Amino acid sequence: MTGREGKRMTTTKELCERLDALEKKARIAEDYVAIANLQAAYGYYVDKGLWDKAADLFASDGTLEIAGRGVYVGQDRVRQYLHQLPEYGDGTIFNHMQLQPVIHIDSEAGTAKGRWRTLMMVGFLNKEGRWGEATYENAYVREGEKWRIASLHGIINFYCEYDEGWHRGGVPLLRSTAGIAPDLPQSFEYEAHPKAVIAPFHYDEV
Amino acid sequence: MTGREGKRMTTTKELCERLDALEKKARIAEDYVAIANLQAAYGYYVDKGLWDKAADLFASDGTLEIAGRGVYVGQDRVRQYLHQLPEYGDGTIFNHMQLQPVIHIDSEAGTAKGRWRTLMMVGFLNKEGRWGEATYENAYVREGEKWRIASLHGIINFYCEYDEGWHRGGVPLLRSTAGIAPDLPQSFEYEAHPKAVIAPFHYDEV
Amino acid sequence: MTGREGKRMTTTKELCERLDALEKKARIAEDYVAIANLQAAYGYYVDKGLWDKAADLFASDGTLEIAGRGVYVGQDRVRQYLHQLPEYGDGTIFNHMQLQPVIHIDSEAGTAKGRWRTLMMVGFLNKEGRWGEATYENAYVREGEKWRIASLHGIINFYCEYDEGWHRGGVPLLRSTAGIAPDLPQSFEYEAHPKAVIAPFHYDEV
């Protein structure tokens, strides 16, 4: 089919088909970087309590569901949820490291799914220090030229007190938020460590 | 050489050569995502004791070597090895976070190498809680349209008791498995922390 | 415009323009992998005190700035700085895990910026064990066919004693090095945890 190998003339139609295929693949490569950047950016904003910046990363109808606290629907509600979290400042650590992506992209549909994990270090000086770790099963959507979070769903594997470690049990899931009720109930019931929990996978095989 | 800049006619042969080069690069970009997804998926399966899912990620003649426990050759033997590990369930944590890839791909050969690291959190309720960290030097192979693990080699940098930390020493390497002898001896002798160990690099420069 | 859809003849000029655009995108995809590999490689070298290997990853006029220790200008000075750090060997752990990249590339200019974070485990047997975490805001430059670090700037979020955790405060920033004065003062003043610190972002949005 190529000019080098073909005995017959390569047609313009053939050239265009190869270009079409390449343009699709080039778009997927761009999408991958954009989605990886997007989720990483979310983590950096959460670390520092930059809630408006974090909310801006959600699609207009994007959803957020963390632990057993129900689902918040739409960027405005995600913003409200985030703003009722504690403020970052002296004495606090809210580190949410965003790690280990498995990303599948349907570039033509402008949608994608990603499994990630976060290793969390949470602290309030002289009050509380905790390790935590959660799996995310997220969805993404292309809005115009930007990728945005269509749904962020964090399933907590464990929280533990720094002074105790995970071998002495775990901190139970927070079941409600102080001031803002969710729009929908949580997707499924579970308990974190010491109970076993396996976040559903968006893929059967890689 | 391009239509815009060239004084002379661009030939079909030239167009095809550019397409050939681009198709190779597009394939490498796809390979990168596939390999990153593959190794990340391995980690998620190990976390939760999904041993059959983990074994399925190995090539039919893929090998596994972890710590000082020897080499298991072939997907069936890898599966056997994995199945003799403890079961995931209430009270256990087997987190193996897959981090920091350095990946080099020979796309035309269908082979690749990757250096990764895993940060491990292992726990059995009321019995044992450990931090650990290892370097992987892995190889990958394309089988049909799928990338698979050709060899996974984990070199342990340290294991320590959560209650002790790494500054009071480390847990010695486990030298054998309970019920299943390896097919080959380990690649090289070493001890983990507090002994120094540097996993060999698959690259001289990046 | 494509052969499949177009009513009129696709011109060679049009084909070449599509090839030009694709070649630019293919280069960016290559750049992304090269930069991700580069920063990850830096971490593996630092882990093991391979200071010459780490220094080789800097551009000839590359700079290094870590914590509050000032700026070292040029690969030779970076090398000197690195060589005055403690030696890796029995009893030491210098783990600097390189995580969570947000990378923006100007491929035609041959420049890029990347936000990363490092989770650090530092230890000296029977003397000191610490957790630490820092944000990097780095720049990269293409030199010939290789990407190199144009500037590495690590802003420490916290260091704490393993035995204390981050909820009992933090270890103050090291303000000077034993034997080698910096070429330039640090970019900005800050204190790490328990003081709040937000590393500047190289991007307004992703």
Image: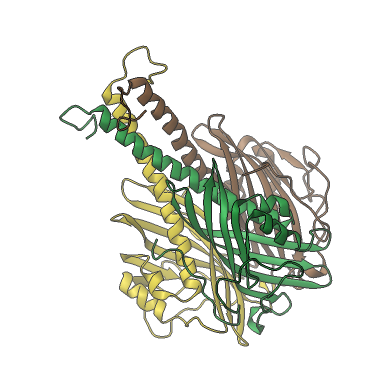
Chain colours: A brown, B green, C yellow
> B13 and C87: which one is in front?
B13
Q: Is residue B15 above or below residue C132?
A: above
Q: Is residue B113 above or below residue A22?
A: below
What quarter of the picture does the C terminus of chain A occupy? Answer: top right
User: Residue at horizontal 41%, vertical 75%?
Assistant: C51
Residue A89 in picture, x, y percent from top left: 62, 62
Residue B99 in picture, x, y percent from top left: 57, 59
Residue A48 in picture, x, y percent from top left: 60, 57
Instruction: Write down the quadrant of residue B21 in the picture.
Output: top left
Extreme-top residue of the structure: C7
User: Residue at horizontal 32%, vertical 24%?
Assistant: A10
Q: Is residue C97 visible?
A: yes
User: Residue at horizontal 52%, vertical 50%?
Assistant: B141
> C74 and B2: which one is in front?
B2
**In the shown orientation, is residue B49 left or right of residue B100?**
right
Residue B1 in picture, x, y percent from top left: 22, 35
Q: Is residue B122 above or below residue C69?
A: above
Q: Is residue A86 visible?
A: no
